[in-house]
Image (tube, coloured by chain):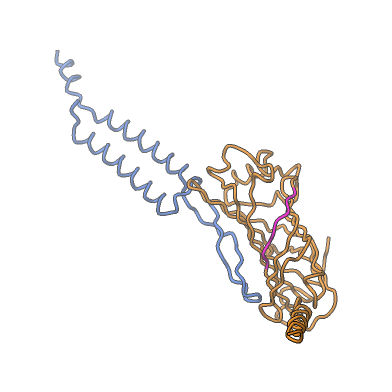
Chain colours: A blue, B orange
Amino acid sequence: MKINKKQKFAIVAGAAVIIIVFIIWLINGGYVFTQTQVLIEKKDPLFGTTYKQWKNKFIPGLDLTLVVTFISLVISAVLFYLFRNKRKDLNEDSK
Amino acid sequence: MKIVNKLIFFTLIYSAVALPQGFNVKAKGSQTFYFQDDKGRNQATFHSITALDEVDGMSNKISGQISFDISDVKSTLKGEISITTASLKTGISMRDRDLKEPKWLDAESYPTISFTIKKVINVKQLAPNKLDVKVLGDFNLHGVTNEIPVDATMIYLDQSPATEAREPGDLLGVTAKFPITLSKYNIKNMILGTRVADKINIDVNIVGTNKPQNTN
């Protein structure tokens, strides 16, 4: 099967999105689940100890990464199909 | 030779008696500190790490009390600290729900997790108001009680304008670190050991007052 330029673009764009999403996931700690809160350390000036507090922070996990990967694959596949060569159909029409 | 032996004997006896086993602060006598904290500053955190996942959690619903004699913490320290099982949070609401389910901590059947001091093994004075203590106590989780050693640091602050800004009365700050093994508390499921470690590290950081406004 020969693929055209547009189909190549669909594959490359899809792969690029997947690679970028996985890089973002790894940079953010490679967690399994997406987190919306993280524990941060705070200093207690009275006792000189550290304690922790929740802070709202979005950290994408593997769950979200896989969802984006799946969506990206579906879009790429649809585009790949839509960008297929239609020469055969044209030939049939001319007959 | 007999004199040398006697000297060594009396030196040992004197050291045992004279070495500080308690705080050297303004306050005297027996004290009881209450750790009920409506502001949510007191906390117990846990940390689990496996090859697949890292989980941090925390509870701010801490209650309990500790009492001791200022000059003799080693032989008088007693008390219990507990947390509400349902108050544990991990930053992911779905995981928080799972944590309370019967296959994990079963918050409905076992609403509290507690530690009761049984015996002080060692006291080391780091400063007049700061002690390192090693205690042996009963840790109760998921309906199972195991005796575990806990290393803790206690800081005693006499009442002052600085402490009053936080709470009335003298303040006692306690930090403790200890590991627990979940399988020893009858917590066994497929995820244990893969996504959640069997050995969990617990950190406690609490501040109590001897003049509580509300001990309920």
The answer to which of A93 and B155 lies nearer the viewer is B155
Percent position of residue B71, x then y: 80, 78
Asked which quadrant contains residue A9, the reply is: top left
Percent position of residue B113, x then y: 73, 52
Which residue reaches farthest right? B29
Please, is residue B70 above or below residue A84 in the view? Answer: below
- The quarter of the rendered structure image containing the N terminus of chain B is bottom right
Q: Is residue B56 visible?
A: yes
Q: Is residue B25 visible?
A: no
Please, is residue B41 above or below residue B5 in the view? Answer: above
* Left or right relative to A74: residue A87: left
Residue pictured at 76% horizontal, 87% vertical = B3
Residue pictured at 17% horizontal, 23% vertical = A87
The total of numbered circles placed on residues is: 0
Residue pictured at 71% horizontal, 81% vertical = B128
Percent position of residue A89, x then y: 20, 19
* Left or right relative to B183: residue B28: right
* Left or right relative to A38: residue A23: left
Percent position of residue B90, x then y: 59, 51
Q: Which residues are magenta?
A: B145-152
Query: Which SS type dominates the magenta stretch?
Result: strand
* Left or right relative to A52: residue A89: left
In the image, residue B148 lies in the stretch drawn in magenta: yes
The answer to which of B105 and B213 lies nearer the viewer is B105
Asked which quadrant contains residue B15, the reply is: bottom right
In the image, residue A65 lies in the stretch drawn in magenta: no
